[in-house]
Image: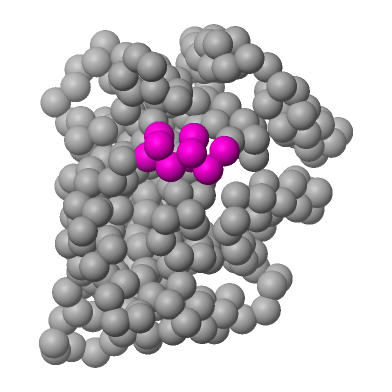
Amino acid sequence: MFDRLTVLAYTLGWKLVSALPEAIAYPLFTLIADAVWWKRGKGVLRLEANLARAVPTADAAGLRALSRAGMRSYLRYWCDAFRMPGWSRERTVSTCRVENEDVLRGAFVGGSGVVVALAHHGNWDHAGAWSTFELAKVTTVAERLKPEELFDRFLAFRESLGMEILPLTGGGSVFGTLVQRVKNGGFVPLLCDRDLTDKGVSVTLLGEKARMAAGPAALALVTGAPLLPMNIYYERLPRGSAARWGIVLQVHPPVPVPAEGRRPEQLAAMMQSCADALGAGIARHPEDWHMLQRVFEADLEPR
């Protein structure tokens, strides 16, 4: 029953929320965020525990305020998702700003593709749609959700934005496909701040040990493509803009490849560089880190 209700909720979201006036839809999702935050469920408490690492100086009241802002940001992401299939190219592009855009565009010089390491920070779907319009074809990987119907709906949503989505499991050689896309000049952004495969590497994130997916570093090593960490966060837009909120892509310098060491040591060093860059961006905009799951090794259940 829960699975069917979940599918129904997302189906209604894409059908009904996109039809609402913007002036109603976003305030409605803010109210939903506040209601969820007031209930203080497991997701909110986990978000608060994660945010405590991003802002270690915050007291209890400060953390509560930050988690409330975080839930509002998280529900804003969902409102965006339900409405994005109807956005025009102009709306998508004009509400996205890039910091260090020369670094991002320069990484494509020479015909090589580019690998990007992302956190669950801001609206990565909006960033993917912008990238498809402005840079190159985006190929990325998504966790296969249950029930399958729900995964198919997310797949259709992201493909409607122009992206190619590969299922993390049950879809053939995902890594081999990514290698080919990069070698053909494609753009491959990969979420890595939560390890979904038990094959990740241990890094220090926000001053504490955490597990990160090693995919971005592995792909960059195999293909020789640049690896760029990238944070994404929301910003309020001036009055008269196409929307009330836009996103900022904070592009970090390419991650250096260690000249020495075996492949595992190289992977670990490169992912630590990603963790350092992404962690700094999260600390700068913690309210947009949509991490309601366990990340830090101290919080993981013993296997």
Seen from the viewer's position, the closer of residues 165 and 9 is 165
List x then y, in percent, for residue 73.
Answer: 43, 26
In the picture, measured across the screen, residue 212 lies left or right of residue 136, that is left
In the picture, measured across the screen, residue 149 lies left or right of residue 195, that is right
* Residue 164 counted in the magenta span: no
Q: Residue at x 48, y 39 (%)?
A: 90
Q: Is residue 225 above or below residue 73?
A: below
> Which quadrant would the N terminus be assigned to in this image?
top right
Q: Residue at x 81, y 31 (%)?
A: 8
- Prevailing SS of the magenta stretch: helix
List x then y, in percent, for residue 201.
Answer: 34, 67
Q: Residue at x 74, y 47 (%)?
A: 153
List x then y, in percent, for residue 133.
Answer: 48, 54
Q: Is residue 75 above or below residue 256?
A: above
Q: Is residue 290 visible?
A: yes
Which range is magenta?
A: 88-96
Seen from the viewer's position, the closer of residues 58 and 131 is 131
The chosen color scheme is: one colour
* Residue 92 counted in the magenta span: yes
Find residue 20 and report its image quarter. top right
Q: Is residue 276 above or below residue 51?
A: below
Seen from the viewer's position, the closer of residues 19 and 234 is 19
Find residue 116 and report its image quarter. bottom left
List x then y, in percent, for residue 117.
Answer: 35, 60
Q: Residue at x 56, y 80 (%)?
A: 177
Q: Is residue 297 visible?
A: no
